[in-house]
Amino acid sequence: MKKLIRAVLFAAVLIYAVQYAGDVFYDRNREALSSTYYEVAPHGCDVLFVGNSLIMNAVYPMELYGAYGICGYNLGTGGQSLPESKHLIEEGIRRFSPKLIVLDTTQLIVKEGVQRITFLHYLTDNMPFLSLERFKLIADLSAQMAYGPDEIMELIAPVTIYHQRWPEITDITRGRDPKAHTAGAKLTGRVLKEIRPLSPHEPDENASFPPLAVETLKEIIALCAAHDTELCLISIPLQSMSQEGFERRVDAAGFAERLAAEAGIRMWNQAARADELGFDRAQDSADGIHLNICGALKFSAALGAYLHETYQLPDRRGDAAFARYEALYADYLKAKEKITVQSTK
């Protein structure tokens, strides 16, 4: 009996230690996956918004909830590649059975083999510590990036960067997650200082993109089709950056639009339509690539209207089963008000 009690106590301590380690390693960077995803989504999540920092800054799911009762979560993270997006979509479909995946296609331009390991930390540090999805993501991306043993161990148990997070670790609770009240969106009031004029550009049908990115996008389309999950590809308006970078992104959006037509799915292509959406280049951009809160509110409103008109997404407002979103929406409004005030200074 004593041995059994010791074994039970040991198991309890081990489970607590693993959970504690997960909190210690949790990355509260604003570019990382939000802590609340795995807390909110199990209560119901009809739409997942997936992509890199462009979608993270541009789509405010709580605006869609307030306007249409659409329950969604933003899984955008800094530097996210299409292989990472595919893993998030696989996990999301398996765990939460969303009705719709909205995928930003900007990742098509990411060169193979150049993603920094930091970008992968934004996901692996924030997924459930012992989940199979986390280890599968680490294994697959480590093979793709040819990571060595030290880098793989850093991803599995990032003790080598422990000291860099000491200010966060001193508050072991997750209350300081900067995206905890925004359903994963990043709110910023920063305004672009320098305006660069951009010349109109039509997509180049001969433009080529990294084979891995193209193949992964095709796999994502097939994955969603196999699970009867609707997939909507989108591109986000770019306002002021280099002409070359602008043209490259417009070409990528054009390629994705042609691929979507071949697959029989929808593509909401806004890469070169900032003016049509009523964007103010002197106010709505944070840095020429990412939208600030002014631009994101406009984009979220337009996207919400498009999704509401195009897909049969239920209105969850007042639904007791989705009460968690009502509370999250109230917190979001407070967070948005703070950012709005800060952006006027």
Image (tube, grey):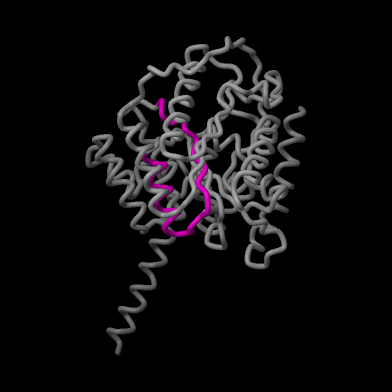
Q: Majority secondary structure of the magenta segment? A: helix
Query: Residue 93 location in percent, x, y?
Result: 44, 55
- Determine the residue positioned at 59% across, 42% down: 185
Vertical order, 256 against 86 (above or below): above
Residue 119 in sight? yes
Left or right relative to 57: residue 108: left
**Camera-nearest residue between 129 and 173:** 129
Is 237 part of what is drawn in magenta?
Answer: no
Q: How many dots with numbers?
A: 0
Left or right relative to 217: residue 98: right
**Camera-nearest residue between 105 and 265:** 265
Query: Residue 267 location in percent, x, y?
Result: 52, 35
Residue 167 in sight? no
Q: Quadrant of the N terminus?
A: bottom left
Q: Which residues are magenta?
A: 83-109
Residue lying at the far bottom in this picture: please name it: 1
Vertical order, 245 against 171 (above or below): above
Query: Residue 302 location in percent, x, y?
Result: 67, 36
Q: Quadrant of residue 337?
A: top right
**Camera-nearest residue between 74 and 310:** 310
Is 92 part of what is drawn in magenta?
Answer: yes
Query: Residue 121 location in percent, x, y?
Result: 40, 41
- Determine the residue positioned at 31% across, 46% down: 138
- Determine the residue positioned at 64% across, 13% down: 195
Left or right relative to 291: residue 98: left
- Determine the residue positioned at 24% across, 40% down: 143
Q: Quadrant of the C terminus?
A: top right
Q: Quadrant of residue 200?
A: top right
